[in-house]
Amino acid sequence: MTTPSHQRIIQRPAAATDLEALVSLEDAIRVRLGDSAWVDGHDFGSGEGNIFILTADPVLVSGALRPILMPLSSVRVAYRRLDSDDFTILYPSNLTAFSIS
């Protein structure tokens, strides 16, 4: 893997998942990405569950994860440069704001 420059976040409302399901999703993502990115862990609380991925190419990671994420309800996906707090929203297209609690 090249040096990561971005953090990608996969987020679900806590009502749509639980900690065990979030960890299972994290494991599936880790397997799917292999050495192309680094799954940096998760957090769960404050009404949401987040999975953090470090990557040099957040858009390339999108294609790899599409089969895993598309069946999920209420998933939100965004990324940011590691040196920035400004998120670029990837999904859903009608989402206008993204934050991590």
Image (cartoon, rainbow, N blue to C red):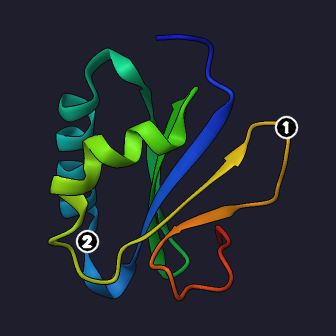
Q: In which quarter of the image is residue 75?
A: bottom left
Question: Looking at the image, which residue is at 28% across and 63% down?
Answer: 19
Q: What residue type is labelled 1?
A: Asp
Secondary structure category for the residue under label 2: loop
Secondary structure category for the residue under label 1: loop
Please indicate, yes or no, whether residue 26 appears anywhere in the rendered image.
no
Out of 42 and 79, give the one closest to the viewer: 79
Can you identify the residue that label 2 sits on? Answer: 18
Q: Where is residue 50 shown, x and y percent of the image? A: 46, 60
Question: Looking at the image, which residue is at 27% across and 48% down?
Answer: 65
Can you identify the residue that label 1 sits on? Answer: 83
Sooner in the amino-acid sequence: mark 2 or mark 1: 2
Q: In which quarter of the image is the C terminus?
A: bottom right
52 vs 81, left or right, is left
The 10 Å Cα crowd at callout 2, few under 14, some 14 to 19, many 20 or more, is some
Q: Quadrant of residue 15?
A: bottom left
Question: Looking at the image, which residue is at 49% across and 80% down?
Answer: 93
Q: Which amino acid does label 2 sit on?
A: Asp
